[in-house]
């Protein structure tokens, strides 16, 4: 329980720190503010990417080789997600053409926020790291992907994974 609280606090401080460092510079217009928000999200996603690469290396060192892409996604949804977030993904869907949707109905990094609609615009800050985490893990397993997150009602969220065919 203590390690979960530490992870949540670390994640919140990481997001806060990235955005505070961005606020140090003078933002003149709304366009500049939007651009700066994109930089912060990219920075958080890159942090997650590197962490995802490292974690997947540790988690898969004693596992058998995966048969296919779907097998890898099942591993991400069950074992990887359970280790990081202490629960499995609630739903995994695919169109069998390289698009997977991972749904978490009670995403741990959003449960601390109010369920009101006024915080939906801030949710992307708290999902960027996790998008990078998934992308980094898949990257180390040999799958190039684009991961996006969507929140329609707090704390549920969907991560869409689009596999890039080489």
Image (tube, grey):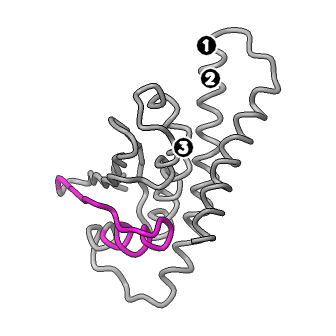
Coordinates of residue 27 in the picture (x, y in percent): 74, 15
Above or below — where is 19 with respect to 1?
Answer: above
Q: How far apart are marks 2 and 1 (CA)?
A: 6 Å
Above or below — where is 36 with respect to 107?
Answer: above
Residue at image point 80% right, 17% down:
26
> SS at mark 3?
helix
Per the rendering, the mark at residue 54 is none
Residue at image point 64% right, 48% down:
12
- Within 10 angstroms of label 3, few (less than 14), some, or many (20 or more) residues? some
- Of residues 54 and 20, the one nearer the viewer is 20
Per the rendering, the mark at residue 35 is 2
Q: In which quarter of the image is the N terminus?
A: bottom right
Coordinates of residue 138 in the picture (x, y in percent): 44, 64
Callout 2 touching callout 3 (CB < 8 Å): no
Judging by the rendered image, the residue that carries numbered circle 3 is 126
Coordinates of residue 103 in the picture (x, y in percent): 30, 53
Per the rendering, the mark at residue 31 is 1
Snapshot quadrant of residue 20: top right
Q: Distance between the residues labelled 2 and 3?
A: 17 Å
On whether residue 82 falls in the magenta region, the answer is yes
Callout 2 touching callout 1 (CB < 8 Å): yes
- Within 10 angstroms of label 2, few (less than 14), some, or many (20 or more) residues? few
Query: As drawn, is 78 to the left or to the right of 56?
Result: left
On whether residue 58 falls in the magenta region, the answer is no
Q: Start and end of the magenta stretch? A: 74-95
Snapshot quadrant of residue 7: bottom right
> SS at mark 1?
helix
């Amino acid at each position: 329980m203590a390690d979960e609280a530490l992870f949540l606090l670390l994640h919140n401080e990481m997001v806060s720190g990235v955005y505070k460092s961005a606020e140090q510079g003078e933002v003149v217009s709304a366009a500049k503010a939007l651009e700066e928000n994109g930089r912060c999200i990219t920075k958080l996603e890159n942090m997650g990417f590197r962490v995802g690469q490292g974690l997947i290396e540790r988690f898969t060192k004693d596992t058998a080789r995966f048969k296919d892409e779907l097998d890898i996604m099942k591993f991400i949804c069950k074992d990887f997600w359970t280790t990081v977030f202490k629960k499995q993904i609630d739903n995994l869907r695919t169109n069998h053409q390289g698009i997977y949707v991972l749904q978490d109905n009670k995403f741990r990094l959003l449960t601390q926020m109010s369920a009101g609609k006024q915080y939906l615009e801030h949710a992307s800050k708290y999902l960027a790291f996790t998008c990078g985490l998934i992308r980094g893990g898949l990257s180390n397993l040999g799958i190039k992907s684009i991961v996006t997150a969507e929140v329609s009602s707090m704390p549920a969220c969907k991560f869409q994974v689009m596999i890039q065919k080489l």
